Amino acid sequence: MDDGPRRPDDVMATVARERGAALSAYAYLLTGDLRDAEDLVQDALVKTFVRGRRIELSSAEGYVRTAILTTWIDTYRRRRQWDKVRHLIARGERVDGPAEQVGARSDVQAALRQLSPQQRACVVLRYYDDLTVGQVADRLGLAEGTVTRYLSVAVGRLE
């Protein structure tokens, strides 16, 4: 990717075209679902470039990855809050969607699904993004000891 001055729309299009597959793979590790991962990447691209900020092409992918992570964490927190009160307004019937009828997934996806969202985020940042424990702690706003504990428990579960 060259790094000449470009309009924000051009940078977004270039990142989506040239790094879209890598960004989707990153989001897939967090979500465990291809459609959710694609939606997450799309949301992150919009959030990153919506205000027309000038972002250099060389650093754009980092901004999008950060947006993917924060958007996923925010969505998880909202969903967890909703799960606490949903029974107050939801009907008693339950309709299973097609996703629950899908057969077995890959071993990595199944293993990641066993982790809590915090553990999964720590594992993805530490081993997929190759960040240090300190960098993971900074990115997630956690203490290094907390990240170390999450990683220890997660690696134990993955084994």
Image (tube, rainbow, N blue to C red):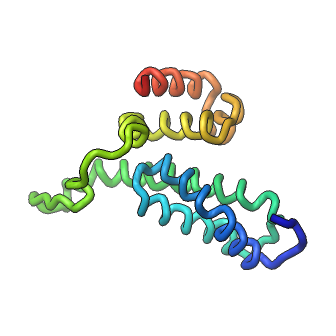
Where does the image place residue 102, in percent across and percent down from the top left? 25, 54
In the displayed orientation, state which residue is furthest to the right: 4
Q: Quadrant of residue 88?
A: bottom left
In the displayed orientation, state which residue is furthest to the left: 93
Where does the image place residue 3, in percent across and percent down from the top left? 87, 66
Which residue corresponds to the image point at 70% horizontal and 67% vertical from the top-left? 15
Which residue corresponds to the image point at 40% horizontal and 55% vertical from the top-left? 33
Q: Is residue 60 left or right of residue 65?
A: right
Which residue corresponds to the image point at 72% horizontal and 78% vertical from the top-left? 9
Where does the image place residue 101, in percent across and percent down from the top left? 20, 55
* Numbered label tally: 0
Quarter of the image where the C terminus is located = top left
Where does the image place residue 47, in percent across and percent down from the top left? 62, 67
Vertical comparison of 50 with 102: above or below: below
Most foreground residue, 69 or 26: 26
Vertical comparison of 45 with 134: above or below: below
Vertical comparison of 14 with 122: above or below: below
Most foreground residue, 128 or 9: 128
Which residue corresponds to the image point at 58% horizontal and 56% vertical from the top-left? 68
Quarter of the image where the N terminus is located = bottom right
Q: Is residue 102 left or right of residue 146?
A: left
Vertical comparison of 118 with 133: above or below: below
Q: Is residue 53 left or right of residue 155?
A: right
Most foreground residue, 119 or 19: 19
